[in-house]
Image (cartoon, rainbow, N blue to C red):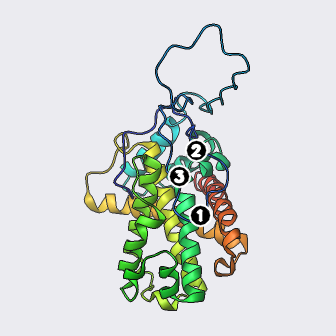
Amino acid sequence: MGTSNAYGGAGGGTPLVPSWLDDGPTGGGAPAPAPADDGDGADGDTGQPTPSPPVPNAPTPRPAIPAAGASDRFTSARTNFSKFSGSGGSDRKSLGRAASNYVSKSAGGARQAARRMGSSRGAGAGLVNFLNSASVNGAREALRSLNLDGLVGQPIEQVFAGLADFICPAGGSIDEGIARDAFVETIADLANAGITDIDQLEAGQIQTVFELYVTHTIEARICNDIGTKVVTLPSDVQAVERVQSQLRDFIQRGVSDAVNASGVNVQSLAPDQVTGFVDQVYESAFEVLQTMGEEAAR
């Protein structure tokens, strides 16, 4: 659902935030690749035994961020989403419980959920910066500033496809895969959203593209965390499509509410304001999804 990087679901002992994920600014361009790390917080470990006695004044290792909540923190969200999908999309209460439990229990709250979207936040900021530059300076200059002159004059879908390697380069982690797959799905949505001319972007269109991208990233993150292999899907293809459509619509409403509640005109943002705005939207979107889920579950 929403990403080709689905796996069997995160285990209860999986840290809520990867040890390599920095909570600092995500930047406005391509996200920095995660350093190679075996997950124990000791970068560059040679595998040699630790000297004894310890080296004086050795730096204190940075503690790994522990998994929050019980080891079964994904169970409730998985169970309820499985009920929702098994109903062919008719059990809205189970969808609500799945969404609220995912944010509050599985992810450890809206702020933690947003922090886990590291690559997606970085790519989202890069996308907004590019769209704003194209709307002010024209697509030609925006592309030239990125050394992408070969995309000048191409259809908007080809322009976005060419931007993918710059804004969300392919990587090996689930986080990076989510960012890239969501970007590809956003490209597929452009025509249906009536966005066909990169040289005539209006403020509302920029907001729409951004909302579509954020929606796809959150959908993919939820599906990967819940684990598509353990979720029971209906055998009817049309029912599966209804389930996916309703989940996406649910998330998109939450994202749209978060963007509109910010009161920000996305097109008016200066480059140094974009990262903070994107971070705020992700956290607010998860807050809204939790609230919407609680209301739907009543």
Marks 1 and 3, Cα distance to the nearest angstrom? Answer: 16 Å
Q: Residue at x 67, y 15 (%)?
A: 55
Q: Residue at x 73, y 75 (%)?
A: 263
Task: Identify residue for label 1.
Answer: 254
- Could you tell which of marks 1 and 3 lies nearer the N-terminus? 3
Q: Which residue is mark 2?
A: 21
Q: Nearer the viewer, residue 230 or 124?
A: 124
Query: Mark 1: which amino acid?
Result: Gly
Q: Position of residue 219 (x, y in %)?
A: 47, 57
Inspect the image, locate mark 2, and give the three-letter code of the amino acid beneath it. Leu
Q: Residue lying farthest front?
A: 56
- Under circle 2, the secondary element is loop
Q: Of residues 86 and 67, which is closer to you in this image? A: 67
Considering only order in the chain, which callout, 2 or 1, is on the residue closer to the N terminus? 2
Q: Residue furthest bottom?
A: 200
Residue type at mark 3 is Lys
Q: Which residue in the structure is indicated by mark 3?
A: 93
Quarter-wise, where is residue 18 in the image?
top right
User: What residue appears at the point 52 percent right and 86 percent down from the top-left corner?
Assistant: 141
What residue is rendered at 26% in x and 56% in y?
236
* Badge 2 or badge 3: first in the primary sequence: 2
Marker disc for residue 126: none
Residue 267, relative to residue 259: is it above or below? Answer: below
